[in-house]
């Protein structure tokens, strides 16, 4: 190191230790960020916004959103009869998880949810 005005440079081992610590810190943050959440507990509610019925039977139902992405669900006894779910009408479904999907309620979607 020079005397007088200059830039202080830490020893090489200290620089290497700082570099390794930063690298390990980034790896730990990445591992934390990539953790998969545990499966939801039974009874957890969720909603499917702007979906329409494309297939319905006594045991399962297939819904599709405005991007034509299908969602297949196994139904329990709480679902209404298939004839009461109008085809080609976008609905917001409010459901609950369990061994099979429980139906809570549904309502017509706002036009802007499926028009965009």
Image (cartoon, rainbow, N blue to C red):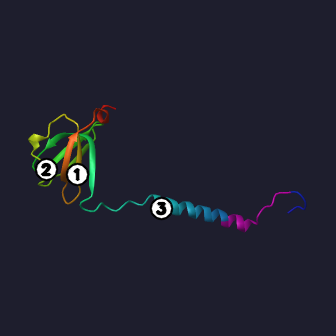
Percent position of residue 92, x then y: 24, 42
Residue farthest toward the right in the current orientation of the protein: 4
> Where does the magenta region start and end?
6-17
Pick the residue in front: 15 or 108.
Answer: 108
**100 left or right of 16 in image:** left
Query: Could you tell me which quadrant the N terminus lies in?
Result: bottom right
Percent position of residue 32, x then y: 47, 62
Q: Secondary structure at mark 1?
A: strand
Query: Could you tell me which quadrant the C terminus lies in?
Result: top left
Percent position of residue 93, x then y: 23, 45
Image depth: mark 1 or mark 3 in front = 1
Report the residue at 14% width, 55% height from top.
Answer: 76
Q: CA distance from mark 2 to mark 3?
A: 40 Å
> Which label is found at residue 79?
2
Q: Secondary structure at mark 2?
A: loop
Q: Label 2 neighbourhood size at 10 Å, few (<14), some (14-19), many (20+)? A: some
What residue did someone put label 1 on?
95
**116 left or right of 31 in image:** left
Percent position of residue 14, x then y: 71, 67
**Picture quadrant of residue 12:** bottom right
What residue did someone put label 3 on?
31
């Amino acid at each position: 190191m020079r005397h007088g005005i200059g830039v202080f440079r830490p020893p090489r081992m200290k620089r290497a230790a700082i570099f390794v610590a930063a690298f390990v810190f980034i790896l730990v943050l990445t591992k934390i960020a990539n953790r998969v959440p545990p499966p939801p507990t039974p009874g957890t509610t969720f909603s499917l916004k702007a979906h329409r019925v494309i297939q319905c039977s006594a045991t399962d139902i297939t819904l599709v959103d405005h991007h034509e992405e299908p969602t297949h669900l196994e139904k329990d006894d709480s679902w209404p009869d298939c004839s009461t779910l109008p085809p080609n009408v976008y609905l917001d479904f409010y459901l609950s998880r369990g061994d099979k999907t429980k139906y809570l309620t549904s309502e017509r979607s706002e036009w802007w949810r499926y028009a965009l």
